[in-house]
Image (cartoon, coloured by chain):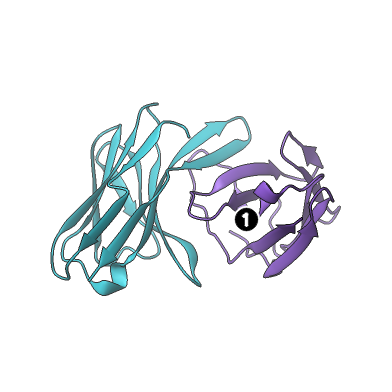
Chain colours: A purple, B cyan
Amino acid sequence: DAKTTQPTSMDCAEGRAANLPCNHSTISGNEYVYWYRQIHSQGPQYIIHGLKNNETNEMASLIITEDRKSSTLILPHATLRDTAVYYCIVRVSDNQGGKLIFGQGTELSVKP
Amino acid sequence: DAGITQSPRHKVTETGTPVTLRCHQTENHRYMYWYRQDPGHGLRLIHYSYGVKDTDKGEVSDGYSVSRSKTEDFLLTLESATSSQTSVYFCAISLRAGSKNIQYFGAGTRLSVL
């Protein structure tokens, strides 16, 4: 699985959009970009994933650049409950269950 | 939470004692995983299972063994606990639907080895 690079930490004002970047310059054509987050003391939680098109769900939007070497997770209206560590993971979505390789992630602090 | 229960949630034990952590799922998922999480290391895969009696090692498997005698239970055993195994342990299951291959995690077990 390709490696990812994320900023160590970011701040965001409550109610504003939080834009979390991720670089994955060695991504392969069959690898998806997944985002998980981990709120303090809880297990990681799936947010969203995509291959090459932008994706949106009830939690967030995912913007993937045309060359697929980077992506941005967007939380449109961040709340205090969005304070967490956000992990960008690149992996093949295969039939074998697959393993997640977590990096250090970005610690997002949403401030009032 | 995909029906995942980890037990115990907290445990304190002494160096050299055996410890077994249990992960129980209620939805008949084929794939199950054990991760550990330590400051500065994120989550690291210990072992995983792709079916009853089918298991494989992850990146930090030394000192750990696993067993899966039935679909719903995946046990992680520390044969002789060491202080370096003090950690938070997470169990996960894998759910595949279309292009999605998502892992759902349990609430974690906090283990302290004194």
Q: Residue at x 63, y 35 (%)?
A: B99
Q: Amino acid at mark 1?
A: Ala
Q: Looking at this view, is A49 or A68 the one in front? A: A49
**Does residue B28 appear to the left or right of A70 in the view shown?**
left
Above or below for A41 versus A62: below
Q: Residue at x 66, y 54 (%)?
A: A83
**Does residue B54 appear to the left or right of A76 in the view shown?**
left
Above or below for B99 versus B46: above
In the displayed orientation, state which residue is furthest to the top: B27
Q: Residue at x 51, y 38 (%)?
A: A95
Q: Which x, y percent locates residue B90?
A: 40, 51
Decide if residue B92 is in sight here. yes
Decide if residue A30 is in sight here. no
Q: Residue at x 62, y 55 (%)?
A: A84
Above or below for B100 versus A89: above
**Does residue A105 appear to the left or right of B9 in the view shown?**
right
Above or below for A62 versus B44: above
Q: Which x, y percent locates residue A13?
A: 81, 57
Disc 1: CA contacts within 10 A as few (<14), some (14-19) or many (>=20): many
- In terms of image quadrants, where is residue B82? bottom left
